[in-house]
Amino acid sequence: MQIGSHSIDPPVILAPMAGVTDRPFRSLCRQLGAGLVVSEMTTSDPTLWNSEKSRLRRDHAGESEPISVQIAGYDPQLMAEAARLNVEQGAQIIDINMGCPAKKVCKVDAGSALMRDEKLVEAILHAVVSAVPMPVTLKIRTGWARAHRNGIRIARIAQDCGIAALSVHGRTREDQYEGEAEYETIAAIRQVLSIPLIANGDIDTPEKAAEVMRETGADAVMIGRAALGRPWIFREISHYLATGERLASPSRFEVRRCLLEHVDALHAFYGERRGVRVARKHIQWYCQAGGVEAEALAAFWASINRVDDAREQRERVDAFFSESPERYAA
């Protein structure tokens, strides 16, 4: 799949997720088979650009190319300025967020709330595409509400404005993350687009990825929540798409090595104090995704959840995943 001059191979993409897709996680997912990773959304509000959070979100040092950065907001000119700023700081693809259903985003008329106002959508897309020489992509949902699925109209607007690729999550904003994603709307969008289309929503196995690509005609799939604690899902999907065969699940020793590398990267990126706090949720996700027995997981989590020392956190993770194999179901 091509996005501008960038070849996305394999066509398996890490979705932008606030508080998750920081540089350590993006780098890990690229190493484990993602063809493209998208940063967590950065605000278009210039009063927040110099905050520590925003600075870290714009840190792409050492990342594999192409570097894709998602921006969020509702004002066309501020979005254009945010796009220019991120290009100056290394972004090679600008992604516009019109898919986030979170209340704190939608209440300021950003994210998926924008889908209610198609004229504003057009103004934002035109402003951002005109502002930067890099390809601009867009992420949307199938609509604002179940009774108002306007994804096809938004898709047409996007293509007419020069958007280089479109990602569609198979739910409306009203659905949040409840129920099952539907792919009929994504398939209908495929019929009206000539630009690359990326399908997103409930894709959690290699078989599901292949099925969704067949059903929708999408050029790629985007993985979000299914990658939490399972960053190797990208190589599993890419291998299956290429060969029709499933890779063996990682051994507990490989999971241990992957998690320790991830924890080390978080400590280095955020500093030990904050890195320990950020690492906690990832440690829990690895344990949950890895099939650790509930009783063993509860005991381990109770022992590590309040650890504030980076070395101790690492040592406890190392010890837990080095213990008896029956604690881990590969």
Image: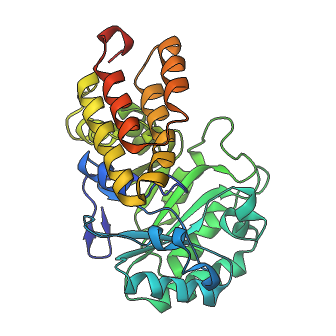
Please name the residue shown 32% across and 47% down the image: 264
How far from the left and from the top, in percent, is residue 61?
A: 29, 70
Task: Note whether 326 is above or below 230 in the view shown.
Answer: above
Q: How many marks?
A: 0
How far from the left and from the top, in percent, is residue 95?
A: 48, 71
How far from the left and from the top, in percent, is residue 205?
A: 40, 32
Please name the residue shown 31% across and 29% down the image: 318
Say whether residue 236 is left or right of residue 172.
left
Task: Note whether 131 is above or below 214 in the view shown.
Answer: below
> Is residue 230 something one can see in this rendering?
no
Say whether residue 12 is left or right of residue 145.
left
Q: Quadrant of the C terminus?
A: top left
Please name the residue shown 34% across and 79% down the image: 90
Name the quadrant containing residue 325: top left
> Is residue 211 something one can see in this rendering?
yes
Please name the residue shown 56% across and 52% down the image: 169
Front one among 237 and 225: 225
Front one among 41 and 60: 60
